Amino acid sequence: MTIDAHARPSGDAPEPLYDVTVPTPTHAERARTLAARISTGTLCTIAIEPAGYPYGSFVTVAFDDGNPVFLISTLAEHTHNLERDPRASLLVAEGGSDDPLANGRVTMLGECCRIAADHAPELKHAGEAFFAVHPNARYYANFRDFAFWKLRVDALVLYCTAFSKARDVSSATMTGIDRYGFEMSARTAEGPRPVRLAFPRSVSTPEDARAALIAMLNQARAQRAEDH
């Protein structure tokens, strides 16, 4: 999610007109709030032809537990790309401002895969989420070439499975973070379970925490690739 800090003029900032200790949403919470109220975006996939180039498509989207859900046709170019390489990103952006670059925008990355027909609960949940935002899409859902796809951006699930004993985790929420690590609530077949993970080294700033989380994510992805 973009912020405008880089555009602020240098020099002494004026004294805030409010109590700066008042709790405010995290950037992650703001990003989820922004994305949840936007129903279209740009889905970027890795093109088959010409090979390796980014391919952007305008799509309708809804969100299921924070993960973007699409109803797309097997005839579409982006679907062909995803069938070969599931890596994708979705850009959603606000409108209505005289300065487009002043609007909020979020880019989400992950693997986008078709929701299998035998995963009935997930398929039902994704359909309900999508039709709540795009009711007219029910017409297309009956076409044999259309299917639901989900972009899985919940890295917390990967943290759980890579660095803890948690298994069969369907979703996870970060509930706390400190200089030594972070805590999550993982949704498992047994219900919500607490999980705490340690950073490789203690952190002292938000930037340090972000760098540690990215390093852990890269490690988790590499570990998953070796397992497969």
Image (cartoon, helix red, strand yellow):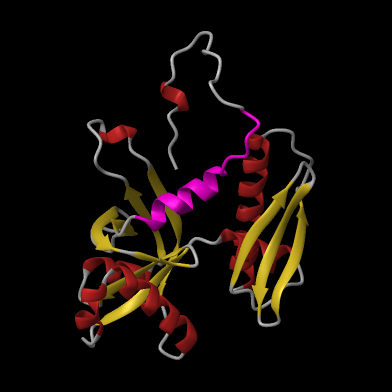
Between residue 145 and residue 228, name the one nearer to us. Answer: 145
Q: Quadrant of the C terminus?
A: bottom right
Q: Could you tell me residue 96's position as x and y percent?
A: 24, 40
- In this picture, residue 3 sits left or right of residue 138: right
**Which region of the structure is painted magenta?**
20-37
Q: Residue furthest bottom?
A: 118
Q: Determine which quarter of the picture holds residue 202.
A: top right
Q: Is residue 81 magenta?
A: no
User: Does residue 93 show up?
Assistant: yes
Q: Is residue 207 above or below residue 14?
A: below
Q: Residue furthest front?
A: 18
Q: Determine which quarter of the picture holds residue 132.
A: bottom left
- In this picture, residue 79 sits left or right of residue 139: right
Residue pictured at 37% horizontal, 79% vertical: 127
Q: Determine which quarter of the picture holds residue 162.
A: bottom right
Q: Is residue 195 above or below residue 191?
A: above
Q: Could you tell me residue 225's position as x and y percent?
A: 59, 66
Q: Could you tell me residue 50's position as x and y percent?
A: 24, 57
Q: Is residue 2 above or below residue 172?
A: above
